[in-house]
Amino acid sequence: MGSYALARPLVRRRIHGLLLALVAGVLGVALAVVAPPPAHAAESTLGAAAAQSGRYFGTAIASGRLGDSAYTSIASREFNMVTAENEMKIDATEPQRGQFTFTSADRVYNWAVQNGKKVRGHTLAWHSQQPGWMQSLSGSALRQAMIDHINGVMAHYKGKIAQWDVVNEAFADGSSGARRDSNLQRTGNDWIEVAFRTARAADPSAKLCYNDYNVENWTWAKTQAMYNMVKDFKQRGVPIDCVGFQSHFNSGSPYNSNFRTTLQNFAALGVDVAITELDIQGASAATYAAVTNDCLAVARCLGITVWGVRDSDSWRSGDTPLLFNNDGSKKAAYTAVLNALNGGGTSEPPADGNSIKGVGSGRCLDVPNAVTTDGTQLQLWDCHSGTNQQWTYTDAGEFRVYGNKCLDAAGTGNGSKVQIYSCWGGDNQKWRLNSDGTLVGVQSGLCLDAVGSGTANGTLLQLYSCSNSNNQRWTRS
């Protein structure tokens, strides 16, 4: 992982059928999500549910937590793939040059195998978590040390590891699309190719993966740079079998519905894809379901790994990003994922936008002056056909305008402004549609409200306690 991969905003959605029979006559359109015809009995654990479609659902395991019975009970029950969180990284397996140690790594591996799980190897060549002796090398000496390390670790696990993250995080953050300026990069631009060729020779049976973060959004320069590298490797016969998308999603680097496009485009190059380190700030059930359905929609998606078991086990515990609470109880996100896996499909959001009209005012939900700036507070305005009044309701519970801006609550209290903001999957961007015409924020439980019961052009929109009044009722047309 990028245990330390925070260099750019950390790093997204889709809900399936069994979750919602969700609705809403209110906006003039039925938004029920239809469950697929069951082809089999629903499974009760994540791993078993994923296996129905030939995929896995895994987790990162830390050897130091294997003495925690609550931890191992959940991990053993729920997951069918394991990644060693830190134990197979360079500093852990070769602390002194040429002196390999696998005590902790083998503890994770043996626990996984004894509990009927496969293992992903993570990671062989990385600029981070290098031992001091490796950090002191450069040039040809460092290149040889990388080759020797790959050979040493893969020899130990030859024929035992399902997938290896051969190279991790080799591209720079930001908009340059350049390689990261690491000590490995400075050995020559071919170092990634050399690592993959070395790995193929060391263990021909393992799937060889490139793994990175902030590469989920198809429009980003880093994603395109990785795509071009994989395309080049496939064209030239460099042995690469799969691409791992870490998928650390949060407000700074949010989930975007084009993630599925990203997975599809990489798969079209002739490589498998995998979601390798998933965690989502706030553990939005809708976003977890969306990511799951994105994998299910791509035939070459091997499976999903969440980066930890409970929130307390997460490297980002303050973001409460996982499927289990600190006490081991299941979150709503867990149920969303399980239902998606059991459904094995996805529902598409409506393609066309509609106006949202206030019952009390007869005026429409409007982005002032058709701006696209995050944080712009919404208003009432005379209805027209402009794109700044066209709102698409998605199966994630969002209202989107311009395609990528969401109806967003800036807070959770009375008077919090309602604005547009780049969609990122947070519950402050999810809305519940009620039969009485109200739109209620999922995070706040408050209603979309015209300030001061106003009806005139320019009346601002806010959150306010639901009061059954017409300034909180809306229709869609």
Image: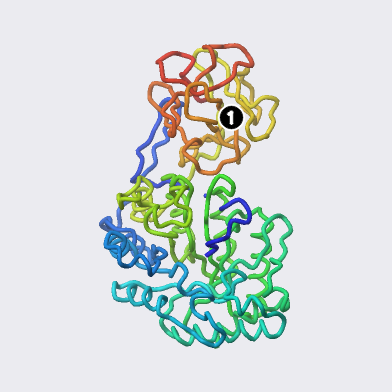
The answer to which quarter of the image holds residue 313 is bottom left
Q: Position of residue 171 (x, y in %)?
A: 66, 65
Image color mode: rainbow
Q: Say which of 273 and 103 sits in front.
A: 103
Q: Which residue is drawn at 40% across and 52% down?
A: 311
Q: Is residue 311 toward the left or the right of residue 398 in the image?
A: left
* SS at badge 1: strand
Residue assigned mark 1: 419
Q: Is residue 349 above or below residue 206?
A: above
Which residue is drawn at the image coordinates 55% and 11% (left, top)?
A: 454
**Place of residue 198 in the rendered image (x, y in percent of width and height, measured from the top left):** 59, 85
Looking at the image, which residue is at 54% across and 33% down?
Answer: 408
> Seen in the image, is 289 located left or right of residue 388?
left
Please tell me whether residue 185 is drawn above or below residue 474 in the rendered image. Answer: below
The answer to which of 263 and 423 lies nearer the viewer is 423
166 or 369: nearer the viewer: 166
Count the numbered circles shown: 1
Residue in the foreground of this view, choosing between 325 and 475: 325
Residue type at mark 1 is Gln
Q: Where is residue 252 in the image (x, y as percent from the top left)?
A: 59, 46
Asked whether the viewer can see residue 204, the reply is no
Q: In the drawing, does residue 237 fall left or right of residue 275?
A: right
